[in-house]
Image: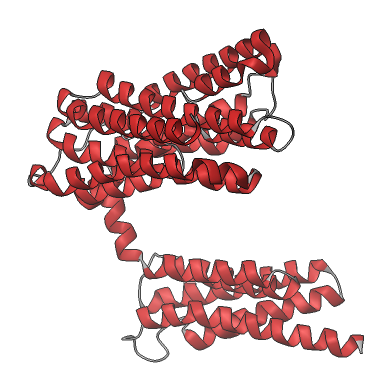
Amino acid sequence: MDVAFDFDSSFWRLFIALMLGAIIGIQRGWVDRNEAAGSRIAGIRTYSLIGLLGGICGLLASFFSELFLGFSLLAFSVLIIVAYIKSQKVKVNLSITGLVGMLITFLLGSLAVVGEPVIAASAAVITAIILDNKKELHTALMKLQEYELDAALRLLLISVVMLPLLPNQGMGPWQAVNPYEIWWMVVLIAGISFVGYFAIKIGGAEKGILFTCLFAGLSSSTALTLQFSHLSKQQAHLSGLLASGILISCGTMFPRILFVCSVVNYTLVEMLWLPMLLMMLGFYLPAYWIWTHYKIETDESPQVKQNPLALSSAFFFGIVLLAIMLLANLLQDWFGSTGTLLLAAISGITDVDAITLALGRQSANGLLVNTAMLGIFIAASVNSLIKMGMASVIGAKSLRKFIIVPILGSVLLGAGSVWVTFG
C-alpha cells in the first residue's frame, strides 16, 4: 500500500516538473518562434524535457545519494555550454539568458520532486514573467536615474540589512525602547516616500497620489501625512490632491480601529461603531469633494522631487517616537491605572493601533469597557489632531486650508456622538 502511494506521489511530482519546464518553454519558444527549425538551442519541447530530467535526477538522488543530483547538474551544465559554444558559430549572441533559463528549469524540476512543488511552481511562473518582460525591464532601466538607484539601494540597506539585526524587545527605562519597532517606523516612512515618488512619476500626479494614499492607509497614515506635507511645500499646485490623499489615508484609521476591536473585544465595536463611522465620513466626504473639485490643478505634468527617499524625515520621526515611548511609560509609572486616558492621549500622538489593541485586551481582563472605549476615542482624536497640526506646520498654506476644517469637524462630530450616547 505504501509503495503504491509513493509511486503515485512520485508520478505526479514528475508530471509537475514536466509542466514547469513547459511553462518556461512556452515563453522561450514564443520569443524564438520565427527562427528556422533546428536553429534554436531549446524550445518548448526541450525545456519540458529539461524540467522532467531535473525531476528524474531528483528522484534518483533520493534513492542513491544527494551527490547524484550535484553531478547530474554538473553534467547538464557542460552539455548546454557545449551547445551554446556550437551555436555561436552559426549566430553570434552574447546573451546567456537562455542558458540560465535551462539551468533554472532543471533545478525547478528537481525541486518539485524532492518535496517543494509549490515553491517550484511559483518560481517557474516568476521566471517566465521575467523572461517575457525583457523589453519593459530594459526600458525601465534606461529611464532609471542614478539618484533613484542610490535611493533604492539605501532603502534596501535600512530594511533588508539593518532591520533584521535589531533586537525586537524592550530595553532601557521601563523596557520602553524597542529598537526594532522604532527602526521599523523609520523604514515605513522611507518606504512610503519611495513608493509615492515612483507612483507619481509613473502614473502622474492624480493616479500616483491615489495609489500612495491607499497604500499608506493600510500601514501608516501619519507617515503619509508627514511625506505629503513636505511634498506640498515643493509642489504647491498639487495641494488639493495631496490634501485629499491625506484625508483618504487618515480616514482608513477608523475601520482599522473597529477591526482590531472586533478581534480582541467585540463589545467595544458595539460602543464605538457610531463615532468611528461619523469620523470616517468626516474624512472621506471632504476628500471626495476636494478630489473631484481640484483635478484641474494637475493639467501640467508635475516636477517630481529629486529625493525619492526622505531619510531625514524618517529619522526625525523615529526620534520623536522614541521620546513618546519613554514619556508614555513615565506617565503610566506616575499615575498607575488612573493614567489610562492620559496614556491613550500620549499614544495617539504617534499610533492608534497599539493602544487600541492594549485597551481592548485590558477591557476583556478587568478594565472598565467604558474607560477602554473612551481611551480609544481619545487616541483616535489626538492622532487626527496631530496630523492636522503636522500638515498645517510643515505643509504649504494651500494645503492647510483643505485640512483643518474637515479634521476639526470630524473630531467634533465624533465627540458629539460619544457625549450624546454615553454622556
56 vs 151, left or right, is right
> Which residue occupies 39% across, 38% down?
192
Q: Is residue 250 visible?
A: yes
Residue 72: x and y, percent? Answer: 71, 73
Quarter location, residue 337: top right
Residue 20: x and y, percent? Answer: 57, 78
Looking at the image, residue 168 lies above or below residue 297: above
> Which residue occupies 65% across, 86% down?
15
Quarter location, residue 265: top right
> Which residue occupies 55% across, 46% down?
270
* Camera-side residue of 239 and 67: 239
Residue 9: x and y, percent? Answer: 77, 83
Q: Quadrant of the N terminus?
A: bottom right
213 vs 317, left or right, is left
> Which residue occupies 23% across, 37% down?
242
Residue 23: x and y, percent? Answer: 50, 79
